[in-house]
Image (cartoon, helix red, strand yellow):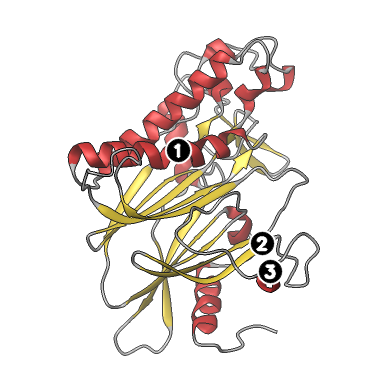
């Protein structure tokens, strides 16, 4: 399993790289901010790489492996597995950091209650994380109103009892590398659904959800945006597009809509896919759109496949 994203934190499921393997800003390894060569996790091996696109690092990620039980209840014997989270923040780092601190904890709580991982457990974990962040926005409204304009995409992968669950809000992507019988190459299989207004089916969904709003999607500078403001239709955070209580001063005018809205414009609910792993499944790439803007699914899979075989796969 391979994850690529801008990285904030990796939990102690592996030991840190030696100093001579770590790269900081301006380092010599293809400009990477940070990288981790192959390490172990509960279901195999993984590596991670970080490229910082903005002056302020707004994103986060994590890998967790082991029992999905609360840390303060070591007597509990809940389900075990591997958890991967990719949090592509926008407007600031607060939502991505909040997700990294809370989503996995909610998942452990609900997984322990039900003694399994399921679609229902994942949905509840997302919902509780969203509720917690919106409550934080309310508490800090008078001192930090711009927190209402901060949000994050959220891509999660969970391996449990031979099943890979992939949940996503936003336009990050999970791609599987699979060997097919009679074919030497590894085929790319996209596992996640994306929620970006540039996709026609997403625009259709938005128009169906908001039939009385002719400007629910707007083509602005040749880019489709929800209300002319944001490309993704599902996120965590972005409270100003979830509830009218935040569509007012002291929020900056550029985030305030001129007309009231009665239903949330953005949705926090993830699309979830369950894939039973087989011997043909070689690896999974989890990455934010920063990678997929430059590589096709198959190009990314070819690079990982070549790297795993110690073959030079690009100039």
Horizontal and vertical percent position of residue 294: 64, 64
For the question of whether residue 303 can be seen, the reply is: yes
Does residue 248 lie above or below 15 as drawn? above
Marks 2, 3: nearer the viewer: 3
Q: Assess disc 2: are there few (<14), some (14-19) or many (≥20) residues with their C-alpha within 10 Å of its C-alpha.
A: many
Q: Residues within 10 Å of mark 1 (few under 14, many from 20)?
A: few
Q: Which residue is mark 1?
A: 204
Residue bearing mark 2: 34
Disc 3 + disc 1, Cβ < 8 Å = no
Question: Which of the 4 image quadrants contains residue 267?
Answer: top left
Q: Label 3's element?
A: helix
Residue 33 appears left or right of 259: right
Figure quadrant of residue 17? bottom right
Nearer to me, 184 or 57: 57
Residue labelled with disc 3: 19
Q: Residue at x 61, y 16 (%)?
A: 140
Q: Position of residue 104 (x, y in %)?
A: 40, 42
Q: Is residue 279 left or right of residue 136?
A: left
Tell me which residue sits at (33%, 47%) in the image. Answer: 272
């Amino acid at each position: 399993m391979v994850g690529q994203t801008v990285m904030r934190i990796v939990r102690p499921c592996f030991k840190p790289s030696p100093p001579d393997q770590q790269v900081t800003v301006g380092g010599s390894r293809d400009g990477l901010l940070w990288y981790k060569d192959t390490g172990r996790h509960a279901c195999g091996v993984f590596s991670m790489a970080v490229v910082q696109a903005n002056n302020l690092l707004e994103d986060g990620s994590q890998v967790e492996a082991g029992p999905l039980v609360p840390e303060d209840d070591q007597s509990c014997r809940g389900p075990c597995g591997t958890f991967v989270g990719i949090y592509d923040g926008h407007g600031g780092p607060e939502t991505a950091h909040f997700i990294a601190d809370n989503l996995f904890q909610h998942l452990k709580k609900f997984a322990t209650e039900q003694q399994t991982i399921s679609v229902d457990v994942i949905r509840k974990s997302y919902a509780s994380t969203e509720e917690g962040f919106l409550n934080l926005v309310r508490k800090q409204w008078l001192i930090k109103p711009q927190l209402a304009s901060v949000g994050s995409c959220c891509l999660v992968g969970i391996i449990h009892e031979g099943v890979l669950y992939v949940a996503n809000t936003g336009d990050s992507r999970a791609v599987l590398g699979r060997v097919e019988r009679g074919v030497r190459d590894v085929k790319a299989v996209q596992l996640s659904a994306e929620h970006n207004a540039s996709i026609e089916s997403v625009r259709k969904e938005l128009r169906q959800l908001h039939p009385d709003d002719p400007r629910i999607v707007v083509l602005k500078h040749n880019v489709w945006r929800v209300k002319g403001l944001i490309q993704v239709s599902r996120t965590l955070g972005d409270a100003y597009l979830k509830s009218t209580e935040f569509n007012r001063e002291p929020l900056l005018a550029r985030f305030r809509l001129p007309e009231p809205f009665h239903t949330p414009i953005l949705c926090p609910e993830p699309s979830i896919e369950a894939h039973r792993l087989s011997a043909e499944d070689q690896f999974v790439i989890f990455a934010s759109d920063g990678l997929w803007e430059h590589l096709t699914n198959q190009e990314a899979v070819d690079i990982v496949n070549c790297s795993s075989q110690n073959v030079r796969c690009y100039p």
